[in-house]
């Protein structure tokens, strides 16, 4: 089989896997039993639909969560009782472009129908139907579990009339023959199946899904056929384009701010509103005559242009879902329901989640199905919170039934009119809510540059992204337990300046917090700030180790290096040209962001551990050489305190002000020389500081504008600072490049700019701005501050000599190290701090000073069940306490520190990604990424070398070190390479590409090019491996491990993995390494955990 095609497994194998996991772990497909949904007796959520009991109105939409048996079973376990089966069509052997799913924020896909053949689809739907009945019995739940399977079919009448689709209809209506065969197949696994009543009619209802662009008469003809000829309760799925181009684009692009481009042809070829009304009236009449139900499924996905870089460039259109679709679908529903005075039967799908499900049900929707939300981290487990939130709403409104919820929310007594009133009000509310607005400068993204490994892939992305690799999960753990002293200690291990960074760190860690894909990033910086305001820690440096170090510059980088070197016992002398330490932190960062008290507290810590700072001491070439001669090591941490000059005509005009001088003077409360109408040029942090400072100085009648040659989303500044600029009312003029400063009598009057456009990406991955010829515009102003960057001003050392080698902080001069702005140019405080700490570690390593032995081992450890349950919950961060934007024409600190209780609760939101990741296992709707437990191990890898005459010698080839107890297998049968795990994996790759690929059936393995397959019988277990070049096996018997491939047969000790005997099959083969056998041993254990004892397909 090709690796992007499904290969369904027999129901017997699937049930064995399910029952094995449940009996051994009390979970199924990794879903903890604690999250299973058992419908209580007399449930307030119970209703009737299509003449059947429906235990809950929640379900999964026709899509990835309903395409295979295990998906449907999992959804059912989590409480989905309305299962919209994946759409089938007569053309059932499609070549789907991959990847085909992008759920980074609002969802997009480029596939829509079942990837299995119709025969396979029916088999898996039947398998799911039967296994649901088996599990309902096994779990001891109510025999009437109230589950409805809803067929979905497309896409034209000609196709529906084809033999294979007709066969599908017949079998879904009566599968008694196939059902008996399957029950006989399963009774050896679950004998009590003979006592379970399983209806032979899987479904008598259907949703019609038509192609975008399907003509009105075709839609009506198909639905009429389904009602009149097939006697099926029928829903018709309609498109959001019924809103019309003006209304839809107004909501999507203007009110909500999404960049999704809906082409004109989407409206031109889709069903028109007037035609839709006629079809609905006609089909309602047909259904009434047939004694059937007719309704609408709202809504389909939204056709849009492929404006991202996820799908193949040949894919012109993609289809939008999720939170951007929600307001569109709700408003379309309100429009249609009003037309029919609340009489329509409506099923909802379009960005439903735990926090809007109660509002949707109060609007009278009969069922609500979900897709996009369950494709995000947490996956099916998210459904549990739907019921929690729904039950809260029932309790808050004193509603015993869903109908009561509708009435109580509306305040009127007519049920249909109450639902309509709620729907119209909710349609208004969603357009006003920030929840559905695209307010982020960039979409959420936790991918990092970290490599994804075959094994051992767990690492917290926040820590990977932090420039100084803060042990963030550790200090959040202690803060959650109110042990702030220990949290303080953890922070100081890698960051000596928590007070400063607690206020002004650009906190890239927060951008990579896994919670961005759940709710909101953890407020990591705010927790650090609170902790930093607790009593300081007493630090005791190690005894003097004989090492003398000189540090040039007392900015964050220099003082960070000084801190860690002094703690390790070095004698440290710092040489600072100014009268105070801190560099840009001290002199440039405005007081509304950073207090003098915070700076003083952090720098006092440096003094207390014995670092000696020589102020007003400039280092020149002579003194630099003296330092070289008198100290063992030097660290150059001089800052970039010289502004880059903007080279355009008129730059010498009066009113053009150096950005650093402006910030320095403003902070020192000196005259700045600015006028009333300011233009800031640039998109970095200094530009934002200059703008926000100018805003506070220009008075009520003044203006501040920022000009940037790219778009706002590409600004390198801290996103929080960009948002603050916009909140405070400043204008950011995007895609503008200054070309000339216009002056009158030598004084600035205007800045002339050229309009830019974005073109292809450059080597850094950013789109390049290009000039639009002739697109000139002027900005009236009296002051221009060109904050376009800073450069080093180091004259004691050649810049080429200053640059270190790869992976080092040592310059081309031995024992001279560099970091911070001196290394990388103008950068952030946390980058400088990280450089200083890491350079100090490199100095200590070179000096032979052992610091690793002093590292503390974290006591933090959570059970896997606890970690998985945490991954099922969405919990939003508290609001930050900030000055009202109307009260910011001053230099008061804008943000307050969070309170103690808020800090504790916020710290509890940490998902402990350093202990368990499992994102890929939860975002895969097919459970293709299997998380298994294994005891960490460390074994010696041996190489057997032939020395002739069947003799061999053993050489040691290194260590096989498996450090983590949770690993991932990719189950090839369940993987269609949709790409969803790639989106959310916090590495630079995707699990389906890198992880070991396990096949569950012999047939699927035989047709694969590479992968693994587990065979078991009573006495032995064999893992078979193959790739394009070779094949091999690892056999586990009660006595030994036997590895065999095309070249050798080797026997290995079960405990120590040492070679006990070996036979080379050819004289051409001279050696054998146990490394591949070690890999296979780990994979075998994972496969055995999945399959159980003696389970082979």
Image (cartoon, helix red, strand yellow):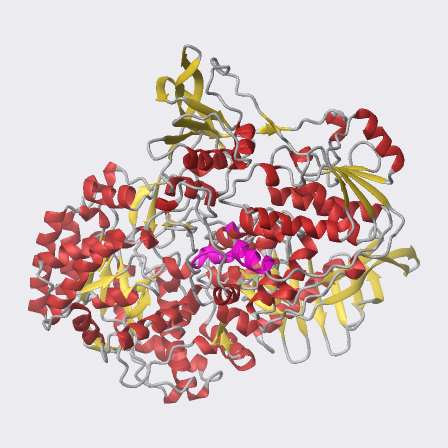
Q: Is residue 246 magenta?
A: no
**The C terminus lies in which quarter of the figure?**
bottom right
Where is residue 907? Give x, y as percent: 53, 64
Which residue is drawn at the image coordinates 42% and 64% (left, top)?
874
Please determine whether, in this image, residue 906 is positioned above or below residue 786. Answer: below
Which residue is drawn at the image coordinates 57% and 65% (left, top)?
479
In the visual, does 622 lie left or right of 1081?
right
Q: Is residue 515 magenta?
A: yes
Query: Can see residue 780?
Result: yes
Where is residue 1026? Give x, y as percent: 65, 57
In the visual, does 552 lie left or right of 381?
right
72 or 346, nearer to the observer: 346
Query: Can see residue 159?
Result: no
In the visual, does 1060 lie left or right of 303?
right
226 or 617, nearer to the observer: 617
585 or 1088, nearer to the observer: 585
Which residue is drawn at the image coordinates 28% and 40% (left, top)?
262
Please determine whether, in this image, residue 867 is positioned above or below residue 430. Answer: below
Please determine whether, in this image, residue 313 is positioned above or below residue 330. Answer: above
Where is residue 506? Give x, y as percent: 54, 45
355 or 306, nearer to the observer: 355
Corner quadrant of residue 172: bottom left
Question: How many marks on residues?
Answer: 0
Where is residue 341? Give x, y as percent: 8, 61
Query: Residue reaching furthest top?
Result: 745
Taken as a whole, is the magenta stretch helix, strand or loop?
helix
Please determine whether, in this image, residue 170 is positioned above or below residue 994. Answer: below
Query: Residue reaching furthest front?
Result: 670
Magenta residues, start to end: 511-533
In the visual, does 548 lie left or right of 88?
right
Corner quadrant of residue 416: bottom left
């Amino acid at each position: 089989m090709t690796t992007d095609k499904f290969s369904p497994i027999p129901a017997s194998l699937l049930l064995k896997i399910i029952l094995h996991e449940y009996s051994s772990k009390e979970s199924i497909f990794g879903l903890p039993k604690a999250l299973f949904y058992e419908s209580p007796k007399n449930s307030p959520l119970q209703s009737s639909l299509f003449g059947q009991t429906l235990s809950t109105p929640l379900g999964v939409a026709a899509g990835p969560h309903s395409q295979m048996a295990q998906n449907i079973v999992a959804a059912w376990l989590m409480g989905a009782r309305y299962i919209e089966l994946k759409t089938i069509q007569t053309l059932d052997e499609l070549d789907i472009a991959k990847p085909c799913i992008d759920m980074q924020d609002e969802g997009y896909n480029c596939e829509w129908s079942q990837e299995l053949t119709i025969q396979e689809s029916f088999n898996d739907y039947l398998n799911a139907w039967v296994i649901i009945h088996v599990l309902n019995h096994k779990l001891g739940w109510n025999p009437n579990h109230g589950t409805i399977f809803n067929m979905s079919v497309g896409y034209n009448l000609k196709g529906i009339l084809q033999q294979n689709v007709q066969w599908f209809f017949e079998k879904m209506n009566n599968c008694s023959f196939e059902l008996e065969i399957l029950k006989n197949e399963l009774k050896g696994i679950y004998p009590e199946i003979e006592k379970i009543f399983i209806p032979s009619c899987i479904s008598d209802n259907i949703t019609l899904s038509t192609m975008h662009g399907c003509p009105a008469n075709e839609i009506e003809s198909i639905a009429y056929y389904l009602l009149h000829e097939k006697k099926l309760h029928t829903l018709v799925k309609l498109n959001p384009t019924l809103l019309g181009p003006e209304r839809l684009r107004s909501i999507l692009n203007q009110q909500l701010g999404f960049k999704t481009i809906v082409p004109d042809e989407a409206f031109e070829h889709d069903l028109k509103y007037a035609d839709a009304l006629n079809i609905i009236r006609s089909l309602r009449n047909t259904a009434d005559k047939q004694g059937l139900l007719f309704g609408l499924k709202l809504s389909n996905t939204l056709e849009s242009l492929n404006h991202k870089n996820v799908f193949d460039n040949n894919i012109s259109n993609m289809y939008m879902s999720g939170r951007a679709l929600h307001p569109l679908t709700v408003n379309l529903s309100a429009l249609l329901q009003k037309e029919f005075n609340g009489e329509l039967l409506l099923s909802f799908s379009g960005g439903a989640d735990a926090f809007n499900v109660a509002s949707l049900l109060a609007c009278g929707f009969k069922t609500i199905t979900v897709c996009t939300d369950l494709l995000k981290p947490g996956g099916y487990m998210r459904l549990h919170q739907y019921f929690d939130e729904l039950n809260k709403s029932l309790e808050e409104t004193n509603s015993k039934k869903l109908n009561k919820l509708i009435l109580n929310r509306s305040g009127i007594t007519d049920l249909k009119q109450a639902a309509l009133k709620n729907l119209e009000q909710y349609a208004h509310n969603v357009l006003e809510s920030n929840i559905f607005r695209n307010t982020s400068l960039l979409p959420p993204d936790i991918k990092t540059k970290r490599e994804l490994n075959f094994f051992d892939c767990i690492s917290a992305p926040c820590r990977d992204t932090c420039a100084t690799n803060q042990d963030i999960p550790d200090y959040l753990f202690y803060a959650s337990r109110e042990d702030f002293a220990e949290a303080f200690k953890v922070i100081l291990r890698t960051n000596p300046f928590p007070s400063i960074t607690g206020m002004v760190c650009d906190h890239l860690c927060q951008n990579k917090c896994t919670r961005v894909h759940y709710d909101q990033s953890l407020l990591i910086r705010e927790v650090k700030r609170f902790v930093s305001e607790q009593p300081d820690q007493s630090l005791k440096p190690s005894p003097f180790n004989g090492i003398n170090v000189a540090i040039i510059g007392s900015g964050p980088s220099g003082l960070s290096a000084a801190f860690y070197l002094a703690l390790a016992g070095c004698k440290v002398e710092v040489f600072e040209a100014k009268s105070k330490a801190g560099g840009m932190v001290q002199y440039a960062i405005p007081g509304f962001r950073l207090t003098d008290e915070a700076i003083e507290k952090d720098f006092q810590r440096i003094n207390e551990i014995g670092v000696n700072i020589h102020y007003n001491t400039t280092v020149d070439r002579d003194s630099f050489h003296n330092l070289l001669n008198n100290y063992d090591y030097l660290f150059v941490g001089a800052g970039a305190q010289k502004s880059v000059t903007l080279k355009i005509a008129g730059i010498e005009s009066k009113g053009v002000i150096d950005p650093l001088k402006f910030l320095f003077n403003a902070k020192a409360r000196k005259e700045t020389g600015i006028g009333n109408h300011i233009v800031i040029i640039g998109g970095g942090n200094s530009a934002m500081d200059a703008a926000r400072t100018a805003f506070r100085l220009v008075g009520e009648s003044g203006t501040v504008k920022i000009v940037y040659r790219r778009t706002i989303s590409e600004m390198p500044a801290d996103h929080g600072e960009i948002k603050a600029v916009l909140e405070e009312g400043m204008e950011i003029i995007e895609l503008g490049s200054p070309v000339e400063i216009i002056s009158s009598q030598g004084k600035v009057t205007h800045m002339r700019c050229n309009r830019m456009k974005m073109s292809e990406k450059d080597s850094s991955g950013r789109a390049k701005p290009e000039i639009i010829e002739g697109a000139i515009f002027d900005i009236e102003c009296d002051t221009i501050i060109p904050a376009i960057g800073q450069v080093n001003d180091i004259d004691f050392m050649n810049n080429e000599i200053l640059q270190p080698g790869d992976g080092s902080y040592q310059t081309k001069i031995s024992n001279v190290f560099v970091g911070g702005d001196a290394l990388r140019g103008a950068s952030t405080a946390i980058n400088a701090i990280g450089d200083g700490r890491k350079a100090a570690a490199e100095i200590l390593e070179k000096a032979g000073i052992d610091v690793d032995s002093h590292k503390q081992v974290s006591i933090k450890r959570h059970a896997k069940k606890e970690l998985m349950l945490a991954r099922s919950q969405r919990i939003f961060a508290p609001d930050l306490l900030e000055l009202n934007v109307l009260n910011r024409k001053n230099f008061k600190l804008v943000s307050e520190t969070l309170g103690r209780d808020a800090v504790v609760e916020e710290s509890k939101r940490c998902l402990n990604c350093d202990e368990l990741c499992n994102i890929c296992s939860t975002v895969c709707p097919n459970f293709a990424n299997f998380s298994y437990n294994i005891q960490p191990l460390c074994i010696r890898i041996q190489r057997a070398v032939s020395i002739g005459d069947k003799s061999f010698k053993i050489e040691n080839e290194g260590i096989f070190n498996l450090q983590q107890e949770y690993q991932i297998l990719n189950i090839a049968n369940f993987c269609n390479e949709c790409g969803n795990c790639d989106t959310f994996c916090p590495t630079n790759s995707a699990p389906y590409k890198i992880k070991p690929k396990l096949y569950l059936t012999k047939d699927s393995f035989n047709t694969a090019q590479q992968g693994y397959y587990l065979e078991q019988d009573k006495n032995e277990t064999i893992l078979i491996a193959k790739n394009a070049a070779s094949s091999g096996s690892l056999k586990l018997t009660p006595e030994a491990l036997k590895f065999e491939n095309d070249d050798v047969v080797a026997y290995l000790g079960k405990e120590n993995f040492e070679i006990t005997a070996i036979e080379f099959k050819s004289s051409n083969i001279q050696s054998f390494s146990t490394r591949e056998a070690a890999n296979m041993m780990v994979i075998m254990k994972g496969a055995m955990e999945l399959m159980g004892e003696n389970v082979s397909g």
